Structures are given as C-alpha cells and as structure tokens.
Image (cartoon, grey):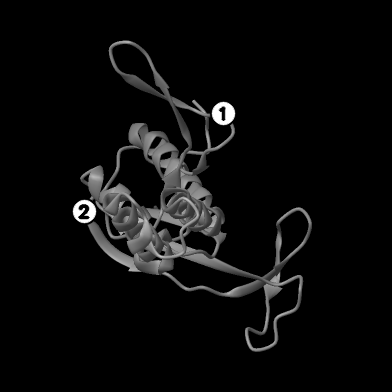
Amino acid sequence: TVDSAGWAAGGGSVVEIVTDDMPFLVDSVTMELNRGDHAIGLTVHPQPVVRRDVAGSLLGLADPAEPTAEDIRESWIHVEIGRVVPDDEGAIEGRLLQVLSDVRDAVEDWQKMGEAALRAAGDLLGGHADPDAVPDPEHGEAADLLCWLADNHFTFLGTHEYALVADADAGELLALPGTGLGILRDDR
C-alpha cells in the first residue's frame, strides 16, 4: 500500500526477492505461487552486479563488464500477484523460502550429482570400458542412460545412496547417512 511502502500494486500484492543469482529461480518461484493459486500479473527479474558490505547492506551497483572479486551477481525478483490477506503472508513467505533453499541445494550440488551418476554407471559396467561387453545387457543400457543424463541432458534435483538389505521375504532399501545431495541433503 502507499501507506506501508510509498507505492501501491493496483489492489494486488507483491512478492520481492533478492538473492544470489542462480538457475531456476524465476521458474521455481512462479511455480510455487501458481501452486498456491496466486494469479501472477507481472514478473520483473533484473540481475544486477552489486557490491555489499560484510553485513549484507547494499553499497552500490558494480560494473558488470569489469566485476571484482567482491562483486556479486544477484537476482532481484518482483512478482505482482492477486491480493493476499495479511494472515496468508507468512505461509507464502515460508513456502517461498523453502523453494529458494531447495533451488540453492540443487544448484550447489549439481556437479556432484552428475559425478554420482557417472560412478553408478561405472559400477554397472563392472570395470568394462565398453557397455556392449558387459555380461548383462541391461546393465550396459542403464550405464549408457546414466552417462547420457549426466551429460547435461537432465537436471538432477537430488540423489541419495541406499544399501539393499536382504531378508528372507524381500529386500529393503536403507538410506546411507551423509550421502544425500541436492534436495535430498537432509538425512531426515
């Protein structure tokens, strides 16, 4: 409102986010807002290079053509949505913070997840360099698929290692602590 912010959003509400720039931010934020049935009217997403002090206060814009080690590319996301009642603001903020955390986890671990897929492919090949030389052809096909996925044909969001514990009736998969990556980092 004009009273609270000095300007108004034409009867709607505004979500504003400032964070380090990374892939998938706008898509993830708009998907979460759509999931909550919030009609999106306008999205603005500049990605300035900025300089901040150690407390995070904005010192100014930096020259994107000549950034220094202290400069940060940020995503400033402004989304205008339908009017939100004040009681719902905290819930929307909480869901968006979780989405942003998931994006950060997936982006920070994407290389490690690709490496995990390649290791799994190597395990399937059992030391054979040629997938066609593997005794079980399904292992060779699965290894080919994992290598193809890891070659930037797939976006890994999370991986976790499991141990197969066999018993008399059936096997059970148990998550190995500390092996989660991306959105599966949390062992819970």
Decide if residue 92 is on the left or right side of residue 50: left
Identify residue type, mark 1: Pro
Q: Residue at x 38, y 38 (%)?
A: 89
Report the residue marked by disc 2: 39
- The answer, for residue 188, to whether it is visible in the render is yes
Q: Give the label, 1 or 2, closer to the camera.
A: 1
Helix, strand or loop at label 2? It is loop
Relative image position of residue 68 (x, y in whole percent)? 75, 78
Q: Residue at x 55, y 37 (%)?
A: 179
Relative image position of residue 152 (x, y in whole percent)? 41, 68
Number of dots carrying numbers: 2
Identify residue type, mark 2: Ala
Q: Residue at x 63, y 83 (%)?
A: 64
Report the residue marked by disc 1: 177
Decide if residue 124 is on the left or right side of residue 132: right
Q: Residue furthest bottom?
A: 65
Relative image position of residue 95 (x, y in whole percent)? 39, 39
Q: Residue at x 48, y 54 (%)?
A: 122
Q: CA distance from mark 1 to mark 2?
A: 40 Å
Decide if residue 69 is on the left or right side of residue 50: right
Foreground of the two, 4 or 22: 22
Relative image position of residue 131 (x, y in whole percent)? 37, 61
